[in-house]
Amino acid sequence: MRVLEALLASGAIDRRDLEITLTLDSNRPEVPTHREFLPIAEAACSRESLRTYRTTFRRLVVAFGDIAVDAISSVDLRPLALKVRLDSVDQKGGNGVGAEEGFIRGARRFYQTVKENSLRSSNPASEISFSRRSPRVRRALTGEEMEQIYAVVLETSHDPSLDVLILDFHRDTACRQGGATSLRIRDINYLRGSVLLHEKGGTERETPCARDTLTRIDDLWTSRAEKEEDDFAFRYLDGTRLTRRRYNTIFLKVHNNLPWAKRLGVSSHWFRHTTLTDIAHATNGRIASAYAGHTSSRNSTDGYTRPAFEDLVSAHDLVFPSFVIGSPLQPNSPGLVQRANSTSRPSQVVQPFLEEPQETSL
């Protein structure tokens, strides 16, 4: 007893874990299998976090469906994490570390819920460490590289109207995937030439968007939405709303046709990086940070001098002169593919765009 008291006092063991362990064989209900526990794990997540964790939860069910949730150890999970990493390399290029990390985070969430329901005393996924990330190779795409990507999408897509519009929207607004999948018609403001983006962490931000892009989004929705009140903007041919799976489809074809894109792991986030790099070159790092939707500030003065929406519009018009905000439509303009003209950069010192750390999801 004194040994247990000493361990509790030192923090070497947790009192709740001890209580669970002592009641494993007496008061604990029958332990469910992974398949039986899946609805409980999903119900414990918020809607946003479930989008991140659902794929991992279901991977666990496929691997351990009829095994009790207290019968799995870190030894069982490590090979599965490695498989996720290798599969990601085969399917998406890159090194797969992000996919592996996403799996580990999802597994930790699943078994934490198991633990909170007093079904086991430890979390086996917490014993798996993240692989060391190599320095990021993500950079701005060149104009030639973007032209190649657009060409592949046009040639291989069964719905080029949607897929090219998705690329244009990311190039125009520098949004994240969630900004496109959650965009609604009500978020479009034609008078200001902007969209209201709903992105990670429940954040909202207004960003400039060319009238040509806005009109094409509205036309697509008008032709495909069955109900006016169902106003999610991007839609498939059958009328259902855009999901993140579409990005896997688009860039899998890009990787299959462009070896350099597969080797680098090019994704929609490279379009965001490209636009923000152009914004930084055409203006400065603070404008690019605001255009990206970053909220962190280095000092209290930054809160008073944060760039206004009008500053973002001016930056947009410098980068995309063929798509000036509020200008008449100019269909088939190459302005979104062309890179910012380096000779038009201002004379002040330009701070390179630095991307904020990204939460990895599958």
Image: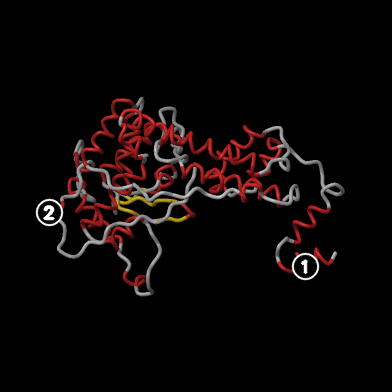
* Residue 345: % across, % down: 16, 57
* Residue 33: % across, % down: 72, 37
Outermost left residue: 343
Q: Residue at x 37, y 39 (%)?
A: 265
In this rendering, position of residue 321 left or right of residue 127: left
Crowd tier of the residue under label 2, counting other residues whose Cα lies within 10 Å: few below 14, some 14–19, many 20 or above: few
Which amino acid type is marked by label 1? Ala
Instruction: Tell me which corner region of the image, top left, top right, bottom left or bottom right, holds residue 30.
Output: top right
* Residue 224: % across, % down: 40, 31
Which amino acid type is marked by label 2? Thr
Q: Secondary structure at mark 1?
A: helix
In this rendering, position of residue 105 left or right of residue 324: right
Q: Residue at x 72, y 68 (%)?
A: 10
| Residue 87 seen in this snapshot | yes
| Residue 64 badge | none
Of residues 53 and 12, the one drawn nearer to the viewer in this rendering: 12
Would you name the residue on which mark 1 appears?
6
Say if 161 sits above or below 199 in the image: above
Of residues 346 and 210, the one drawn nearer to the viewer in this rendering: 346
Would you name the residue on which mark 2 appears?
343
In this rendering, position of residue 321 left or right of residue 304: left
Q: Gap between marks 1 and 2, in whole Å? A: 70 Å
Q: Earlier in the sequence, mark 1 or mark 2?
A: 1
